[in-house]
Amino acid sequence: MYLKKIILSNLLLFFCFSSFSQSSYVDEKGVFRWMKNDKEIRLFGINYTLPFAHGYRAINYLNNDHKEAIDKDVYHFTKLGIDGYRVHIWDMEITDSIGNVLNTPQLDLLDYLLFKLKERGIKTLVTPFKVGGNGYPEKDFPTPGFSSKMGKWQTYSGKEILEKQKRYFTQLLNHINPYTNLAYKDDPDIIALEINNEPRHDNGEVATKYINYMVDVIRKAGFKNPIFYNVSERSKYIDDYLKTDIQGCTFQWYPTGLVHNSLLSGNYLPNVNKYEIPFKSKESFQNKAKIIYEFDPGDTNSSVLFPAMARSFRESGFQFVAQFAYDPIDLAFANTEYQTHYLNLAYTPSKAISLKIASEAFHEIPKDKYFGSYPENNEFLNTTLYPENNVAVYNSSKKFMYSNTTNTKPKKLNSLEEIAGIGNSSIIKYNGTGAYFLNKLEKGVWRLEVFPDVLWVNDPFQKASLKKTVAILQNNNNTIEVNLPDLKENFLIAGINKGNNYKSKANLHKFSIEPGTYILSNRSTADNFKKIKINNFQVDEFYNIKQKVKKTYVVHKPLEYLETESDLEILVKIVSPNTISKVEVVLPAGYQKTDNYKMIKTDNFNYQLTIPKAKIKGDTFSYYITVYTNKGNITYPGNINGNPLDWDFVSQKKYTTHIVAKDSEIMLFDASITKFDDFLWPRQWNAVKYNINKIRFKNKANNLLSIKANNLIANNPDITFKVLLKDIIYKEKNNISESKSLIIRASSGEKSSQKLQIALQLNNGQVFGKTILLSPLEKEFTIPFSELKSVPMVLLPRPYPDFQPYYFQSSSKEEFDINKLDALQISIGPEINNVGQKEKQEVLIKSIVLK
């Protein structure tokens, strides 16, 4: 009897441990599920790399505390509805030369991060193995790790390297996290493993053997949750991957490419219209769960793309997705980790709120639910996208969220429990630029959290450096108006975060506020709510940084040209460590004379002024901007101490706008002057090999843009590039509606004839174009708008993975409208037959104008 009790007791312990250590599984239909209740897993997450590589080092450079930085960021994850986390471990920073795990500071920070995520209810996908350097954006730093001198091609075979991986994986999975007292293999919040980061296979048979070997290693180490493998990096070997013992497949999605080196303008919703899996019908794929290990619309600041991507992910059956990568708040002032990505709640508030909306959408959209094609899919369940205003809105019976100022009204005002937003809505009016959050604690009692104001002072997607500031936070005092039915017009406000002793009373629902956390109530009961926990955070929590502003920044781009007899509107954004008393536009007016025009301050950062046309003479209008502060005067451009009126003021730099006569033509492209900053080029790999360059002459008027290719032999027999027209459209906003035709001056160079499609891309995803036949003789082609026909949009920049769609056809049935012009699309490929595709292609373009 006693023996039976021992056996029964041991069995119970075994089953309890098994249940504890295995928290997820993949069923026979490929659905990722929770072990405890068999419900479908649905997690919306981020990548966050502070414990490793540049993130780790950069915190050291700033003499900041890594764990304090992690505390701040993980709290902000909870504000954004993040419940998933993915990390590829820089194994080279936590191992020795033969794969033994070392107790390095990086491993300690990973342990600490996993512990803090667990506290917030955030689940983790771990990718233990990453072959590749640890330097970016710096040079690689030497480490003792066994993969530090490997290439990816060396990873998949050979007894010695496989033994090192076995040793590393076994020790890592059995490593006891000192903050959780759990081995990684037994942590129920590590719900899956992805074997390695972005494998680059060149042999399918070797891939199969390698994956099965690593699955066996992982299982023998004691890890019971599902194992995933990347199938999108080298998808040509999909059949070899699907033969293995993995339970799921991982994919990435960078729909606007990577590293454009500047902010992309335009509407990229067509680029995220759908996520295509070309092998989705394969029988061996049907029992595999699907994960997006990394996604981001790189080089954009759009607040509509994340929710659209969430919709497309659910349409394709993904259950765990993770943005790459969230910027630590301590480093986001410079955006050095990955210049092509920029996401932080404080520094990119609209984008961050759109991520929160995306999380809500992802969690509520049924798996494989289809919402049609763009633009009809701009509305899905409780989410609506307004690309023309860069606004995403989530509007359910209990939650109301908006990524920028909106006219949308809450569906059910009286039942609202959570609000998150930027700017103004029908219930919140706020003149700051940061995000704010409201949570209902009980009737007549709300929690308000306000983030600091932010101003971008440089393009964050250009070359990265900790010496360069791209954005500035300021803890300004702003006015907010809160109109909620259960709050009286004179409700009480009490600060509750540490050190916040603010107390006040609203006047007609309005009050002044600084960054922090507050209780809004009809009665003085703030202390009763300080220690309440909601949504995995304490009511009195607040994390912020006080960024030191070292100099005055003036953000201003002068208008390139202005038509005669027109007023000139000058807009400037300014932030300074000093108190600004006034800002003036200063015009030289003779010897030691200037004309000074005081600018009007419209909010914390913005100043504006209209110069009347009577004051604008000659063929140029040149001016300075002088900022007057309590620490002296500074004149721009050039950041010169002093005022142009000073006798010793010396500066060769001025802001200049050219004064031009009204013209019947609007120049879209001119080979003599056009720079390539606003061009989107085709991708060279897995595509037609082309050569594009500018042919320059002594007389610039003869300059040409040359596009050449030996042939069009490729999966997509096409060469398309685009010219983004945002700046031109702004300058010509008063004239563009008068345009009636498109004119191109071009030739076929040394080729006897060449077909070229010239098209106008609209901001609703429609493209209208016409194919013309060029000859060696340069000729001017006039294309009336009436001759333009609907043509497919080529999706540029080209995405990762490269099996995503090349073309997009808008579902809109609208007529051509020049007022919606977004870009110029130029293509070699349309209407060229199979024989022609094998021939040399050549186009020389001098200019393209609207008339």
Image (tube, grey):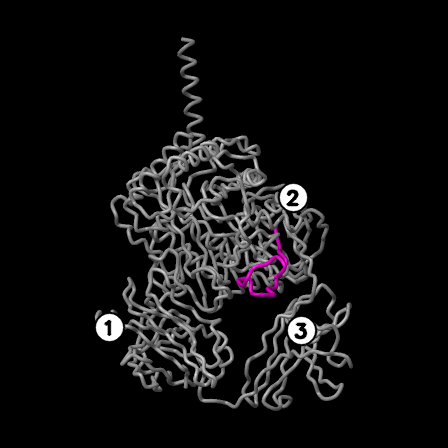
Q: Earlier in the sequence, mark 3 or mark 1?
A: 3
The overriding secondary structure of the stretch rendered in magenta is loop
Residue at the left extreme of this rendering: 835
Q: In this view, does 583 lie above or below 395?
A: below
At 37% across and 43% down in the image, what residue appears?
229
**Residue named by callout 3:** 638
Residue positioned most to the top: 1
- Element at badge 1? helix
In depth, the one of 510 and 846 nearer the eye is 846
CB under 8 Å between callouts 2 and 3? no
> How far across and down, in percent of the image, does residue 228 sit?
38, 42
Between residue 92 and residue 292, name the one nearer to us.
92
| Rendered location of residue 347, percent (x, y) | 58, 58
Query: Could you tell whether 394 is left or right of 375 in the image?
Result: right
Residue that badge 1 annotates:
836
- Pointers 1 and 2 in contact (CB under 8 A)? no
Check residue 455 for magenta coloring.
yes
Look at the picture and state if 16 lies above or below 4: below
What numbered label is drawn on residue 178?
none
What stretch of residues is rendered in magenta?
446-469
Q: Which of 71 and 778 is in front in this view?
A: 778
Q: Quadrant of the N terminus?
A: top left
Query: Which secondary structure lies at badge 3?
Result: loop
Q: Earlier in the sequence, mark 2 or mark 3?
A: 2
Mark 1 nearby-residue class (10 Å; few <14, some 14–19, many ≥20): some
